Amino acid sequence: MKNNSPNKLFIKRLLALFSGGLVPFSFSPFDFYFLSFFSLAIIFYLWVKTKTARESFILGYLFGFAMYGIGVNWLHISIDLFGGVSIFFALFFTYILIAFISLYPALVGYIATKYFKSSIFVSLPILWVLSEWSRGWVLTGFPWLNIGTSQTNSNLSNFAPLIGDYGISFIVCIAAISAIKIFSPNKIEKIISLSLLIIIFMSSILLNKINWTENTGRTLNVALVQGAIPQEIKWHPNQLKESYNIYTQLSDPFWSSDLIIWPETAIASKYHMTKNFISEINKKQQSSNTFFMSGIVNDDVTSDKYFNSIILIDNKHRFYNKHRLVPFGEYLPFRKILSRPLHLLNIPISNFSSGKKTEKNFKTSKGNFGMSICYESAYGNEIRRSMPDANILINVSNDAWFGDSIAPHQHLQIARMRAMENGRYFLRATNNGISAIINNKGKTISRSPQFEKNVLNSDVELFSGETPFSKYGNIPLLIFFTFVFFINIIRRDFF
């Protein structure tokens, strides 16, 4: 037995790596969503059969390292090609992030084995979702590869308006645990597990028949313009006018529509330095009554602050200033500590200011627009701040930072989840793809090809009302988790 022990340990760790490495393939562009169940069932089973918290930690870490190592390794592309550092440092910084976020599944295994071994089947789904939720806000958060988001093409997506993507993660975890327990020698456990799977399946079908929000009967004809300006040249001073001409020519046929949208920083300059461009757009807007939006840098010359923004030109100029900034990409956390070593390494540092989180909407005569910029769409709570006032959700993005990787596909899938959660159409205008028009059920009506000049032109519907998730967010789920843990502690202490 002792001779076989190291072999068994090796096989368990190999299984943890293998199952973690499968998870990214449940997300777009692969969309093998069933792999999420399969992978979680394997790691949960390994944790159940592991006796020591230390070994559960190692298994969880290997699972997480494979999952994130494959799923978000595209981060090095932006650091290497556009961050001004060598490939060595780009890979090093990517490794540091992956090594850090791999701690989340590792801690799930450790805590479950050490403190909840007697109720591990109940605790694992809750601990997993709490780890995802924590990862979404600790150190500003990195809510990428949430298991719930992998289910946009499955029937479980029908739970999104009710409990959001974290809630769907919980459902997937319950299904994974139930799949394990079906093979239990205990007949009662088998029956309960099979019943849970049937309830989940039937509920997902029934939920599809519920319309949580109402069609207002109003439509907008929108044009999402994709200029496909290479990121390498986008910010060159002599490229500004050429980029503007490209976007103008693409937009010219659509000045009879209700709304034209250019992507994030399509006008690659500060607002006060683009008066000539803006005045030309003003003239076209006034003669057509078409509303115009574009990403731009909004600078406050009085306070020397500047913002990653969206300008809306209707009968005046209004701005939405991005609230949720990307750490290291748009601002430097722990600036006093990190600015000097990064400066010595010749790493460029952006210094955008954060907009007010309460200013999320443009209220116009054509509808109420819920706004977000790029990475903000990854945060369910960030998007639901627009609700219930928003009739439609609009996001401008720039995924050119990540080249021809899986990142833009994952980002589009996240946008689909936000549409489902809130029961609203979601317009996604990007610099080089994937631009998309998504309906209130999360279905992609039309999408652009990547790396090509393109305009998506379509009628979209405006909705009103709010889903349970729009109204309450993750609070009911967190209350439920607290209640279950409280009952578990009482049962353990007094019974």
Image (cartoon, rainbow, N blue to C red):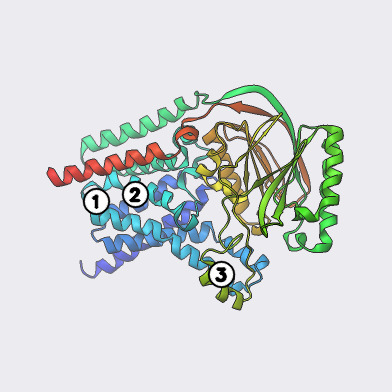
Would you say residue 403 is visible in this rendering?
no
- 2 vs 90, nearest the viewer: 90
Which image quarter: residue 180? top left
The residue tagged 1 is 116
Q: What secondary structure is marked by label 2? A: helix
* Along the viewing direction, whichever of 412 and 27 lies nearer the viewer: 412
Check disc 2: other Cα within 10 Å, few if <14, some if 14-19, many if 20+: many
* Mark 3 surroundings: few (<14), some (14-19) or many (≥20) residues within 10 A: some
Q: Earlier in the sequence, mark 3 or mark 1?
A: 3
For the residue labelled by badge 3, is the local secondary structure a helix, a strand or a loop? helix
Q: Quadrant of the N terminus?
A: bottom left
Q: Foreground: 2 or 403?
A: 403
Amino acid type of the residue that numbered disc 2 sits on in the rendered structure: Leu
Corner quadrant of residue 121: top left
Circles 2 and 1 in contact, beta carbons < 8 Å: yes
Residue 461's quadrant in the figure? Answer: top right
- Residue at 51 percent across and 71 percent down: it is 337
Q: In the displayed structure, does residue 44 sit left or right of residue 282?
A: left
**In the rendered image, is residue 347 in sight?**
yes
Q: Amino acid at mark 3?
A: Leu
Residue at mark 2: 127
